[in-house]
Image (cartoon, grey):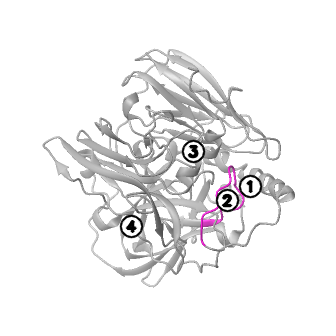
């Protein structure tokens, strides 16, 4: 378990200690409480020996048409049987038949037109998480694509380069749909980022993290709010993979696509990881840290310099947070270092300049709470469960607001995600944020009792958009509300 003492030993700043210091006790409580009432679990799948499966790279989706200003893509949502556990075929829900879905590489200022065809038996809605899009292109929870129908999403990409991702958002179905595979990367690049000289090409690697619970036949088992049994860790759809790396710098574009699991990750030798970006794009400056803390929906953009290792070295990316057996959830993947090669990439001291924070005109407070384990299955924002016919927050277009968000649950962590806008985290529990959270964000992690103060400016699109917990089972249980910008 990750403890406050371990956080201090690893050299985290005060903000990072606050973000993860309570985690050990929280998850110990959650796990032990679940074990006390749970029946004997069903037989699991055949054991997978960690670090025996090579890391796959998600396929990059090619546009079927290109014009001077736009790229056109076609995606079909359909069932497929894929090999996740060696020697077994698992039925999953997919974009274009792959698990995870294919990656779209878009460019800032260049439009991407994506036709989504629903060949499944249930309605879907495709949300570009982190995207600045109008209401009818946002992929909201009630804007459904019925079976046998399609919808064309138009993304103008009027925002800076960032690691974004797509996932299903059909309300009351989003949790299971995402769990069974409906997610994929959307990497948005721009010229300013290109000019920095960060590792690129084969040395820029997406890492899509998630967990799953498999039965003896290798099929995914879905149970709402199951934090305990999803103990198979997958990276790019492979269980505990290994990756051969040259002794040089690599850039990793990581997304936590889990429904519930929070990761606190570190290299097994304790050497630093250099954060260069978060949810909404690049950080102002590189932020070296021994850990990467990532809750569901959050992204981390970081560089690891493998030139410090001798060829033949094996370095594990470990996870220091439960719930689950350490031999399963305590490790994520392994890097196998090969020979040194020429490396002209760099990590400059200045990555970007964030716009100044305008003076806020409105302050609001939000409380996140859910029924504690064993007491029910509802979740609330300001003591209300989601109602798509209700507008919870009226916002004047062009305004800047400060939102104070508190997790009032006693044992359960939450996070908070806003559609449409990227925000800045001003403070956590009255303390400055740590450097890896100093950039643009759309999702913020809150352990029980924690409070975060966020600043948001609503100056792009008018309309109705949701905000919700992105521990997506909690969202499906009602921890979601709507804002109207007018």
Residue 321's tag is: 2
Reading the image, the residue beneath label 4 is 57
List x then y, in percent, for residue 393: 56, 19
Residue 146's tag is: none
Q: Is residue 129 visible?
A: no
Cα separation, mark 4 vs mark 3, equals 28 Å
User: Which of label 4 and label 1 is nearer to you?
Assistant: 4
- Nearest to the observer: residue 106 or residue 66: 66
Count of labels shown?
4
Q: Is residue 332 visible?
A: yes
List x then y, in percent, for residue 225: 69, 49
The residue lying at 79 percent from left, 41 percent from top is: 376
Question: In this picture, is 188 found above or below 429?
Answer: below
Cα separation, mark 4 vs mark 1, equals 32 Å
List x then y, in percent, for residue 57: 38, 67
Task: Give, as a single range, the part of the protein colored magenta.
Answer: 218-232
Cα separation, mark 2 vs mark 3, equals 28 Å
Whether tag 1 and tag 2 are in contact, CB under 8 A, the answer is: yes
The residue lying at 34 percent from left, 42 percent from top is: 352
On the rendered structure, is 8 left or right of 234?
right
Residue 173's tag is: 3
The N terminus sits in image quarter: bottom right
Reading the image, the residue beneath label 1 is 24
Q: Crowdedness of circle 3 by 10 Å Cα count: few (<14), some, many (20+)?
A: some
Cα separation, mark 3 vs mark 1, equals 30 Å
């Amino acid at each position: 378990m990750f403890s406050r003492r371990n956080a201090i030993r690893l050299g985290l700043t005060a903000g990072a200690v606050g973000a993860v210091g309570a985690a050990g006790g929280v998850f110990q409580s959650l796990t032990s409480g679940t074990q006390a009432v749970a029946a004997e679990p069903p037989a699991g799948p055949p054991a997978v020996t960690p670090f025996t499966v090579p890391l796959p790279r998600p396929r990059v989706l090619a546009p079927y048409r290109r014009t001077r200003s736009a790229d056109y893509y076609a995606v079909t949502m359909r069932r497929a049987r894929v090999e996740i556990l060696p020697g077994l075929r698992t039925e999953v829900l997919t974009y274009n038949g792959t698990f995870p879905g294919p990656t779209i590489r878009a460019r800032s200022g260049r439009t991407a037109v994506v036709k989504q065809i629903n060949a499944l038996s249930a309605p879907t809605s495709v949300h570009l998480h982190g995207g600045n899009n109008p209401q009818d292109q946002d992929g909201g929870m009630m804007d459904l694509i019925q079976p046998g129908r399609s919808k064309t999403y138009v993304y103008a990409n009027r925002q800076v380069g960032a690691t974004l991702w797509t996932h299903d958002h059909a309300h009351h179905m989003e949790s299971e749909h995402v769990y069974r595979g409906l997610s994929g990367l959307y990497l948005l690049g721009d010229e300013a980022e290109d000019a920095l000289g960060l590792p690129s090409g084969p040395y820029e690697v997406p890492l899509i993290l998630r967990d799953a619970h498999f039965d003896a036949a290798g099929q995914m088992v879905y149970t709402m709010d199951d934090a305990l049994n999803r103990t198979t860790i997958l990276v790019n759809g492979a269980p505990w993979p290994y990756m051969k790396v040259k002794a040089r710098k690599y850039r990793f574009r990581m997304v936590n696509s889990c429904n519930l699991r929070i990761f606190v990750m570190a290299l097994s030798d304790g050497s630093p990881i250099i954060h260069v970006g978060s949810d909404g794009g690049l950080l102002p400056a590189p932020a070296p840290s021994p850990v990467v803390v990532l809750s569901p929906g959050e992204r981390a953009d970081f560089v690891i310099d493998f030139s410090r290792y001798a060829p033949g070295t094996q370095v594990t990316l470990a996870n220091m947070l439960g719930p689950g057996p350490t031999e399963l959830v305590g490790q994520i993947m392994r890097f196998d270092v090969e020979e040194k090669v020429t490396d002209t990439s760099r990590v400059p001291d200045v990555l970007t300049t964030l716009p100044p924070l305008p003076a806020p005109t409105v302050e609001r407070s939000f409380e996140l709470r859910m029924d504690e384990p064993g007491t029910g299955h509802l979740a609330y924002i300001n003591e209300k469960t989601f109602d798509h016919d209700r507008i919870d927050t009226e916002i004047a277009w062009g305004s800047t607001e400060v939102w104070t968000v508190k997790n009032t649950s006693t044992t359960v962590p939450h996070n908070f995600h806003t559609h449409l806008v990227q925000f800045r985290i001003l403070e956590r529990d009255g303390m400055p944020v740590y450097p890896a959270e100093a950039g643009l964000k759309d999702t913020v992690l809150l352990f029980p009792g924690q409070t975060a103060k966020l600043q948001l400016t609503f100056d792009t699109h008018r309309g109705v958009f949701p905000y919700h917990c992105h521990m997506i089972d909690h969202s499906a249980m009602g921890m979601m509300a709507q804002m109207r910008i007018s």
